[in-house]
């Protein structure tokens, strides 16, 4: 870090919660990852903005940690500022058939609550972990839909610390991608429906049941490791390469869904990264396909 001590004084002065040299393994669903120089937990958009502004002004490395559910943090950790968004959980109906939700809201929670509040649409994202901000940044989704199509606008924090609204027409969403990758998202406004609530609730139940049967729920994993290649399925390719159950150290390929890796307990980021390389090599040999990571590596 460039101005290591200055950050402690700055954050203490502004009363923004932070921890020094905090192990990130506590905050990732894989339960791996070394320490962050500073883990900062802003509670308001203003606090978030002041941290972003200082990072940008000083050219400090800035990482945004949402639900940590699509992330491998290396064992050596990260040298820089990690903003954890979990305290940014505002919620307000927009009066236009949708609502604005803070980036740190858990996606699974808002999927559930939106049905309770009489909104339909988000049930397509049932069973997807992570935060709303993270979900929008990577256009999280599955075969029932993606979040990108439900976004009316996004509030981002500019390099000068000023919040700015990006409307749907300025946003680009692709398969597990968006043009928000370099942005710090503070909140998201979703456009939903008010109709077919009973059908939406039924669909929620069905998707949950289907996922529980097909994915290793209750284990330490980060969902699908690789993107599906054009015209193919990463899970099937890994399975056909005979890799179900393959292990390096305490990292294992799930027997239930081969695109999921599991921390069996005490696994390192290095174990996971070695297993990833082995999978990529074996699948390339067997089928000629080069698998691209869906999980993010810090
Ligand atoms: N398959 C196998 N072996 C396996 C796993 C899958 O042969 O070990 C086959 C299945 O039989 C099926 C096909 O591969 O014919 C596709 O599998 P699945 O229906 O499970 O869907 P997926 O393409 O593997 C995608 C998303 C998931 C999402 C599901 C359900 C990606 C990379 N994955 O999985 O998202 O939950 O659809 O909607 O797009 C994630 O992004 O982290 C994630 C888990």
Image: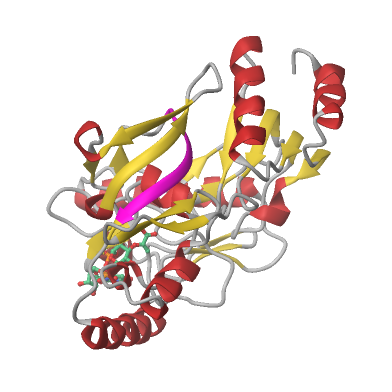
Vertical comparison of 108 with 63: above or below:
below
Question: Is 8 drawn above or below residue 129 in the view shown?
Answer: above
Q: Residue furthest left?
A: 231
Farthest residue, direction front: 95
Judging depth in this view, the residue of 52 and 13 nearest the camera is: 13
Q: Which quadrant of the figure shows ligand 1? A: bottom left
Q: Residue 62 appears at what percent x and percent y?
A: 60, 27
Let me know if residue 294 appears in the view: no
Percent position (x, y) of residue 240? 27, 66
Q: x and y percent of residue 273 in the render?
A: 54, 45
Q: Is residue 197 left or right of residue 66?
A: left
- Describe residue 92's horizontal placement relative to residue 20 as left or right: left
Magenta range: 182-190
72 or 36, which lies in front? Answer: 36
Q: Is residue 141 magenta?
A: no
Q: Residue at x 44, y 62 (%)?
A: 223
Q: Considering the image in quadrants, where does the C terminus appear? A: top right
Q: Residue at x 72, y 55 (%)?
A: 26
x, y percent for residue 56 = 59, 16
Query: Can residue 187 be found in the magenta stretch?
Result: yes
**Quadrant of the image containing the N terminus:** top right
Q: Name the residue located 37 percent from the left edge and 40 percent from the top edge.
A: 154
The image's colouring method is secondary structure
Q: For residue 54, which quarter of the picture?
A: top right
Tell which of 86 and 294 is nearer to you.
86
Q: Is residue 128 above or below residue 69?
A: below
**Residue 84 visible in the picture:** yes
Q: Which corner quadrant of the image does residue 288 belong to? A: top left
């Amino acid at each position: 870090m460039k101005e290591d001590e200055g950050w402690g004084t700055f954050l203490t002065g502004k009363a923004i919660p932070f921890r020094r040299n905090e192990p990130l393994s506590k905050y990732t669903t894989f339960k791996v990852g070394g320490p962050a120089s500073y883990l900062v937990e802003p509670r308001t958009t203003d606090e978030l903005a002041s941290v972003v502004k200082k990072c940008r002004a000083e050219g400090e490395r800035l990482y945004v940690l949402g639900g940590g559910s699509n992330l491998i943090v290396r064992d050596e950790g990260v040298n820089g500022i990690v903003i954890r968004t979990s305290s940014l959980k505002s919620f307000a109906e927009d009066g236009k058939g949708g609502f604005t939700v803070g980036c740190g809201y858990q996606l699974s929670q808002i999927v559930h609550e939106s049905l309770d509040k009489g909104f339909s649409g988000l049930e397509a994202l049932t069973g997807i972990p992570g935060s709303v901000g993270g979900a929008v940044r990577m256009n999280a989704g599955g075969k029932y839909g993606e979040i990108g199509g439900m976004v009316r606008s996004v509030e981002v924090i500019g390099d000068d610390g000023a919040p700015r609204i990006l409307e749907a027409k300025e946003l680009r969403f692709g398969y597990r991608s968006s043009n928000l990758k370099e942005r710090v998202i503070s909140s998201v406004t979703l456009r939903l429906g008010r109709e077919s609530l009973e059908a939406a609730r039924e669909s929620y139940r069905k998707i949950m049941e289907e996922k529980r049967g097909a994915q290793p729920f209750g284990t330490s994993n980060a969902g699908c490791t690789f993107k599906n290649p054009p015209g193919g399925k990463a899970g099937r390719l890994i399975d056909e390469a005979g890799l179900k159950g393959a292990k390096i150290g305490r990292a294992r390929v799930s027997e239930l869904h081969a695109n999921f890796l599991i921390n069996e307990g005490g696994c390192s980021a290095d174990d996971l990264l070695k297993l990833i390389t082995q999978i990529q090599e074996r699948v390339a040999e067997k089928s000629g396909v080069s698998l691209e990571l869906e999980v993010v590596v810090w």
